[in-house]
Image: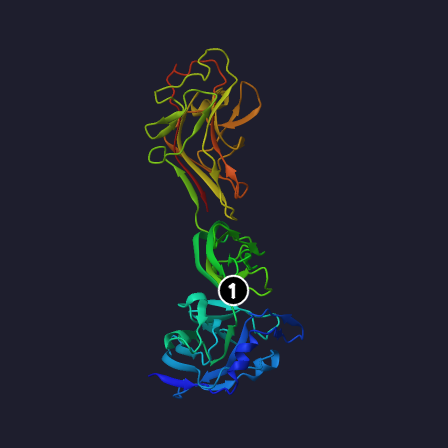
Amino acid sequence: MRINIFIIISVMVLAVIMGCSTANEITNPKGDNASITASGPQILGSFDFSWDEKSPTLDIVPTRDIEAHFNVTSYIYPKHIKLTIISWNPATRVLVVDATIDNPTNYDVYDVRGILTNMGAKKLLNADDYTKLFDKNTPRIANPFRAYAKDEPNRKLWGRYANPSQYTKTEQFEIYFPAEIAATFIITGCYPSNCPEPYDILNIEQTGTLYVSSGSIDVTLDALDWQDLTADHVIIEANPITVNEINMEQIDLATWSATITNAGSAPEGDYDLWVAAYDASFPFALYNKFTIHVNADQGWSWYDDFSTTSYVWTAYGGNWWGKYNGYMDAAGGGDCYEEDTGSDAENPNVSYVSSPSISVPASDSNLILTINHIVDVDLPEELARFAWDMCYVRINGTQIFPTGGTLYEHNHYPWTFDDMFCWTGTYSLTESIFDLGTAYNGKTIKVEFVLDTYDYITNCKPENQGWRIDDIILELE
């Protein structure tokens, strides 16, 4: 059922229109005034409305509270605002209302807005933007509005001399009322030109994923301004995610961009982030908001099986390291390996192969490295203490120690009582696990497999397999 409601407010419309052309002032509850230019926004009408969900009409009264806080001396002629209830859904608590405005004068008015205030937990689900103008709270609250005449040049609500479709405009308001159905409706407009602040923030888009301890989201939006095409500056206001405000970067004529990380370690959930766009000539911003979801920390991982993956590893100090038959192989793809100098002379050099750079996300979880490998570079396991050749793992040049699976052997190398920990003996394919804690979280690392062929004995006599490494996994618990 549609119910037409006519709002009767007695005024002289000429005073309203001329109000935009004079240097009127906005007064806030603290008593200080903010000067407005000739085209500054003015209140053209204001009323409180409520509904008991049963009556056939809305209950509407002039907004005396607004009059008490602002210099409101002019209102629209009676019967030039019409509200039509389109639908009410008691399950979703959404009321849909058409608000029709017509201009009864021969003056063109610009940037006419229908602003809802006194919202609390209520929401205008289809807001164009938000403004803090004419809000009586301290500090001011960004209130949602629908803009009129968006289909006309410069958003002009034409005077009565034009076609009825140009001086009569309707905007639909979809309002969520969790409980009491009541709010304040303010109509504002500008004369003789457009509003001095930016007039629209739109096309808000975000890409990326944000977690409690990692990730990022890139945000882009368009900020439109009548004065300079786009705003002078745009910020994302401080919030639980960013902690501090973020200055967005202009990337083309009207588009602005910023990267958001969870600097505040905000817990999992949805968060509204407010964007404020400013013109250099006006102290009040235009606002809009978007919602970002923070995900629970996920199990980040990095994996290389040397077969289906295509990471580039780099060998140092030797000529046998390479990918062969699905392994990173220190036997050169054959049945044995040679000294990295190609000589029988004593060789104190260390040969190793290094992963590409790996960026580990910031996280409070432990970083776990797991490898599957075959070690066969010197004596059997039971004689490891006499071994000269040995294998071990480093990260960024520092040796790390397995905490699970096949552990290092205690080796006195070479023929001394110096404590060394490494692998040397002959094994079948086995798994070794390194619990690295949080020391490398949030850092860039390289995993290095080190083969120290200290001795001068030809390693093909007997035939040793060298070191074959498979299925490397880095993951956050």
135 vs 336, left or right, is: right
Image mark count: 1
* Front residue (pair 213, 344): 213
- The chosen color scheme is rainbow
* Front residue (pair 182, 184): 184
In the image, residue 381 above or below residue 80 = above
**Quadrant of the rendered image containing residue 343:** top left
Residue 60 horizontal/vertical position (percent): 47, 86
Is residue 294 in sight in this rendering? no
Alpha-carbon neighbours of circle 1 within 10 Å: few (<14), some, or many (≥20)? many
Residue 91 horizontal/vertical position (percent): 37, 77
Residue 403 horizontal/vertical position (percent): 49, 38
Residue 59 horizontal/vertical position (percent): 46, 87
Is residue 336 in sight in this rendering? yes
Q: Residue at x 32, y 28 (%)?
A: 325
**Quadrant of the rendered image containing residue 334:** top left
**Amino acid on which disc 1 is placed:** Tyr
The residue identified by callout 1 is 287
* Front residue (pair 267, 344): 267
**Quadrant of the rendered image containing residue 322:** top left
Q: Residue at x 57, y 22 (%)?
A: 417
* Front residue (pair 294, 435): 294
Assign a secondary structure to mark 1. Answer: strand
Q: Residue at x 52, y 64 (%)?
A: 287
